[in-house]
Amino acid sequence: MLYYPRTKLAEALADALEGRNLFNDAPNGLFLAAPRRTGKSTFLQADLQPALERRGIVVVYVDLWAATYRDPGELIADAIGRVLQSYSGLLAKAAKALESVTIADMKIDISKIGRVGGATLVDALRALHHSAGKPVALIIDEAQHALTSEMGETAMAALKSARDQLNRPGTVNLMLVMSGSDRDKLLRLVNGNAAPFYGSSIKYLPTLGADFVAHLAGLIEKQRPALAPLDHAVLLQAFELLGHRPQFFIEALNEALSPFDGDQGRPENKVLGLAYRRQQLDREQMVSEFRALRPVEQAVLWRMLEQGPRFRPYDADALRFYSEKSKAKISRAMAQKALESLRDRQPSLVWKSALGEYAVDDAAMHRWYQEHVAAGTWPPSSLEQAGT
């Protein structure tokens, strides 16, 4: 896939994390939200991480969706352990992936970081900072997934403690960057007195836009001069229809420019047509998924979409809503069974935190719901006739 560098944005965020900007809370934690497939992970790994490393900062990167079958708390601890291992002269012992290291008179078993009987995340991060002699930046991609397990919840609290212990006024030794594809879920890390990073705020990571489109158009015009000049405005419209998702936009460009395409029309118009088709297919897929649900499942999902972060699955208003929409008396047990069924679907439609909080798994479904409501076409099918 083509890579488009966002160096200026990365440098600006690196400045913020180092505390170089006045009236900026990033040294206490930088929380970034961006829709799925809009280039968030690429930016974190290919732009922000190198920008920090160029400044002499040790970077630990972990993607909590890279291995969803593993506990997110373990993934965080293991990522810290691997980098700590490399700074302790053990990298050459790759065959022995799990070793003990002694730093500043403290023995740390790499395999037990963050676990019962092992070093805490605070100890491990302090040891990494001491061993490297540099500030440390921990980048956690899809950080909201940490909230789905008790160990992940504990890890978040430990990272807050590590931040408080390692940082001092005017000195930032531990930088925390946490990203998420769903702002509502990420908010659970910063909203409410029990949230580990209470008081911090969520920032939207800017999506790719006109500069990215112009960059790709320039590559095409250089390779195929006969097509120049391409209409950037039409291409940008297509990119926006595709939700600023680079992968889908590049796929559309490849199809429009394919030598096997017998259509001799302008590629910009073909890309725009493909974007409309993709948008329609996405909407139809969501309608199809909704219609395939049983009435009680539809009612529960409807309530979640309507209530958002205010969703409470079993209160009296919720049970009354389920019963009204599904035309049947719905008990707490029936609602709970419906929620578990929605979670068990592939792909899952519902996300659950370790504290028993529920949310729609894909934030794009909220936008789809709001479009239907605005158009007066919700629900997309009759609850009585949909599903079995």
Image: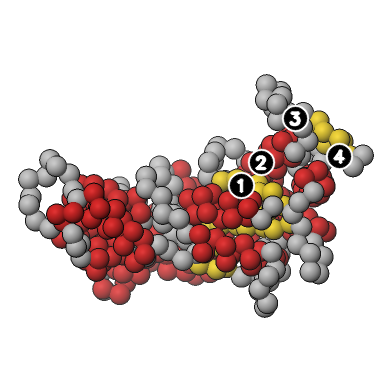
The Cα atoms of the two marked residues, 2 and 1, are separated by 7 Å
Tags 3 and 4 in contact by the CB under 8 Å rule? no
Between discs 3 and 4, the one toward the N terminus: 3
Q: Quadrant of residue 304?
A: bottom left
Question: Which residue is pictured at 75% across the width and 62% down the height?
Answer: 172
Residue with the mark numbered 1:
61
Task: Give the amino acid type for the residue marked by disc 2 in the picture.
Answer: Ala
The Cα atoms of the two marked residues, 1 and 4, are separated by 22 Å
Q: Nearer the viewer, mark 4 or mark 2?
A: 4
Between discs 2 and 1, the one toward the N terminus: 1
Residue with the mark numbered 3:
90
Residue with the mark numbered 4:
103
Task: Give the amino acid type for the residue marked by disc 3 in the picture.
Answer: Leu
For label 2, the SS is helix
Q: Position of residue 24 (x, y in %)?
A: 66, 74
Q: Residues within 10 Å of mark 4 (few under 14, many from 20)?
A: some
Q: Residues within 10 Å of mark 3 (few under 14, many from 20)?
A: some
For label 3, the SS is loop
